[in-house]
């Protein structure tokens, strides 16, 4: 790898990490604003115009707060857990192709992604999202608090229950695209139709399992206040709590970006039609790539809105209902979806 290519990758990494952290911080503000709108009340509106600087105030407040660690906690792992949570969330963004190729250096085309052209892109994403549960489970165990431990164990049980259905929900997409490469999956949608029209069941399954995977309501059992006080992050304060909080929102944005890639055409702007022909732009020209990137972000943030909307609309499940849904409903449906998809592909070939 030449020095120029290395510099390009490092610049991309810096852009993506800062974009993710800023987006996660402002997703907290968006959640508070949308919650206020749904509940017909006033949200944050004091810090800056329309409350737009509230996120900076929240981060500054957490930064100057005292870091309190229980005397009986394991200090090393107590500090390591938030780092694992945010680190895994950041790493996931390296594989997601946020745009088509923008520049070409030494025969290599670069878009706004660090490693988008992996032959096992989907498997790598699933592997990294699975590792994220270690941060939550470690946070619960290292706190030496029975409520925190219970929250960590719940998160691990949810991951086992829903990760299987999440992986199976993607297999229909893989069968149609014929590849595990995320670039190939987007290209298959730009050449035909978005996979949400071919795999609506897979999309719904992935959305439900993503809610459980990110510990979002109505599946936020690891941090259920009525019975667990605050769950796995009960004994956290200051920026350690802030990192755990940001990791949750970073994972929501990552899940939304993955759904936009797999089911909504990625950077494809107009379904069923060729973007370059309709817009009168050359394929992969700079204006078209920028428009495609904006379309990708629009789809991802629309799905983030759905995450927030669901949280403030549905009550929390009981834990036995959560497990029954994962094992007795979603898993059989995902298996049937794979069989039906395989049969349709077989008979249409």
Image: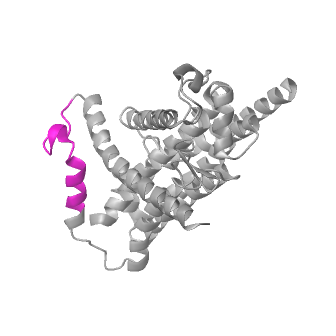
Q: Is residue 258 magenta?
A: no
Q: Is residue 50 magenta?
A: yes
- Residue 148, picture quadrant: bottom left
Q: Position of residue 97 (x, y in %)?
A: 56, 46
- Residue 75, picture quadrant: bottom left
Identify the residue at horizontal 25%, vertical 57% (top origin): 59
Q: Can the viewer see residue 228 in this picture?
A: no
Identify the residue at horizontal 35%, vertical 79% (top origin): 72
Residue 197, compared with residue 296, is above or below; it is: above
User: Who is closer to the viewer here, 191 or 143?
Assistant: 191
Q: Position of residue 94 (x, y in %)?
A: 53, 55
Q: Can the viewer see residue 212 in this picture?
A: yes
Q: Position of residue 184 (x, y in %)?
A: 68, 41
Identify the residue at horizontal 27%, vertical 65% (top origin): 238
Give the image's coloring scheme: one colour
Asked if residue 49 lies left or right of residue 229, the reply is left
Q: Position of residue 241 (x, y in %)?
A: 32, 62
Asked if residue 69 lies left or right of residue 250, the reply is left
Total tally of numbered discs in the picture = 0
User: Who is closer to the viewer here, 138 or 348?
Assistant: 348
Residue 276, compared with residue 75, is above or below; it is: above
User: Who is closer to the viewer here, 2 or 246?
Assistant: 2
Residue 338, compared with residue 92, is above or below; it is: above
In the rendered image, which quarter contains the C terminus?
A: top right
In the rendered image, which quarter contains the N terminus?
A: bottom right
Q: Residue furthest left?
A: 46
User: Who is closer to the viewer here, 215 or 167?
Assistant: 167
Span highlighted in magenta in the image: 41-62
């Amino acid at each position: 790898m030449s020095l120029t290519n290395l510099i390009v990758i490092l610049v991309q990494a810096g852009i993506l990490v800062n974009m993710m952290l800023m987006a996660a911080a402002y997703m907290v503000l968006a959640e508070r604003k949308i919650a206020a709108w749904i509940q017909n009340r006033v949200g944050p509106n004091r810090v800056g115009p329309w409350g737009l600087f509230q996120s900076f105030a929240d981060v500054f407040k957490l930064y100057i707060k005292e870091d309190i660690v229980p005397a009986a906690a394991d200090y090393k792992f107590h500090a390591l857990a938030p780092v694992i949570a945010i680190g895994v969330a950041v790493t996931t963004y390296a594989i997601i192709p946020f745009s088509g190729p923008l520049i070409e250096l030494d025969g290599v085309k670069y878009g706004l992604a660090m490693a988008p052209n992996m032959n096992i892109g989907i498997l790598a994403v699933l592997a990294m999202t699975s590792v994220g549960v270690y941060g939550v489970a470690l946070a619960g165990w290292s706190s030496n608090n029975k409520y925190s431990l219970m929250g960590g164990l719940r998160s691990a049980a949810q991951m086992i229950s829903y990760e299987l259905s999440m992986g199976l929900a993607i297999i229909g997409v893989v069968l149609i695209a014929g590849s595990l490469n995320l670039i190939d999956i987007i290209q298959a949608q730009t050449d035909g139709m978005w996979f949400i029209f071919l795999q609506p069941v897979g999309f719904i399954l992935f959305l439900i399992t993503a809610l459980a995977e990110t510990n979002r309501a109505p599946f936020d059992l690891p941090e259920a206040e009525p019975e667990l006080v605050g769950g796995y992050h009960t004994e956290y304060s200051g920026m350690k709590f802030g990192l755990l909080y940001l990791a949750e929102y970073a994972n929501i944005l990552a899940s939304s970006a993955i759904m936009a890639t797999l089911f909504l055409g990625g950077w494809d702007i107009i379904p069923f039609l060729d973007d370059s022909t309709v817009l009168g732009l050359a394929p992969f020209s700079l204006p078209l790539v920028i428009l495609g990137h904006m379309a990708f972000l629009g789809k991802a943030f629309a799905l983030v809105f759905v995450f927030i909307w669901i949280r403030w609309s549905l009550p929390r499940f009981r834990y036995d209902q959560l497990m029954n849904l994962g094992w007795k409903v979603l898993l059989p449906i995902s298996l049937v979806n794979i069989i039906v998809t395989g049969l349709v592909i077989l008979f249409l070939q």
